[in-house]
Amino acid sequence: MRSFARISCIILSAGHSGRMGIHKALLRFGKQDITFLEKIALSYLEAGISEVVVVVGRDLDEIVRQNHIELPVNVRFVVNEHPELGRFYSLATGLKQVQEGNSAFFQSIDNPFVDPDLLAEMSLVLGKGEVVSPVYRGKAGHPVLISHNVSKAVVDKINSGLRIDHFLANFNKIHILTENQN
């Protein structure tokens, strides 16, 4: 297991999942007896990320407590009191909670597939750019890795209403080609 010193993970899960009838974080992963939330968080921890921050809405925070979903102590929840302000606000809310000076992976709750080899490859090239994202057949995907400087810039613009992709376009981006469609 590789150590990802100075890299955290933000899982964005503050949106409403009305179409599904259940919050996406609570969907079961395959035939395993774990939720998407547990699968993603544990995958990052098993890959060597030491800090995972899950940005949730008030409803999910309560549901997780009621269902006694237990995660390791280095997985923390932060409630986004304003999910209507969008993903950028959620990302900034999570980044405010990471260890000072850390870079961060971020991804949405609806993709429970985390590739530890891809995380390692992305972390190795972070110094060549400030934003690293995987690309599969010409399409950018997740997770995205952002430098500490980009993290600070996101937090500084928390109330801007910006789209994440538009904001990140202002920074030097490195694309990692992958054959992993997940």
Image (cartoon, helix red, strand yellow):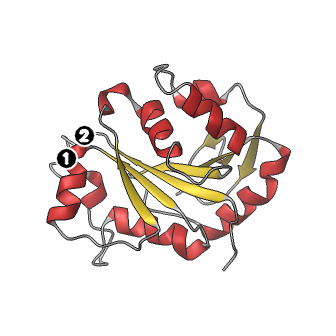
> Which quarter of the image is occupied by the N terminus?
bottom right
Give me the residue at 36% from left, 26% from top.
85
Q: Mark 1, residues whose alpha carbon is within 10 Å: few (<14), some, or many (≥20)?
A: few
Q: Quadrant of residue 99?
A: bottom right
Query: Relative to residue 45, is residue 82 drawn left or right?
Result: left
Residue position marked by numbered label 1 in the rendering: 59
Image x and y of residue 142, in percent: 56, 49
Query: Relative to residue 36, is residue 115 drawn left or right?
Result: right
- The kind of residue tagged 1 is Asp
Give me the residue at 42% from left, 38% from top.
90
Nearer-the-camera pick, 137 or 85:
85
Residue position marked by numbered label 2 in the rendering: 16
Give me the residue at 30% from left, 56% from top.
25
Nearer-the-camera pick, 122 or 64:
64
Of callouts 1 and 2, the N-terminal one: 2
Give me the residue at 69% from left, 44% from top.
148
The answer to whether 46 is drawn above or below residue 112 in the figure is below
Image x and y of residue 98, in percent: 55, 52
Q: Are marks 1 and 2 in contact (CB under 8 Å)?
A: yes
SS under mark 1: helix
Image x and y of residue 145, in percent: 65, 49
Mark 1–mark 2 distance (CA, rounded to whole Å): 9 Å
Q: Quadrant of residue 62?
A: bottom left
Q: Residue furthest front?
A: 100
**Label of residue 147 in the image:** none
- The kind of residue tagged 2 is His
Q: Mark 2, residues whose alpha carbon is within 10 Å: few (<14), some, or many (≥20)?
A: some
Query: Relative to residue 98, is residue 136 drawn left or right?
Result: right
Q: Is residue 181 visible?
A: no
Image x and y of residue 101, in percent: 68, 49
SS under mark 2: loop
Q: Quadrant of residue 57?
A: top left
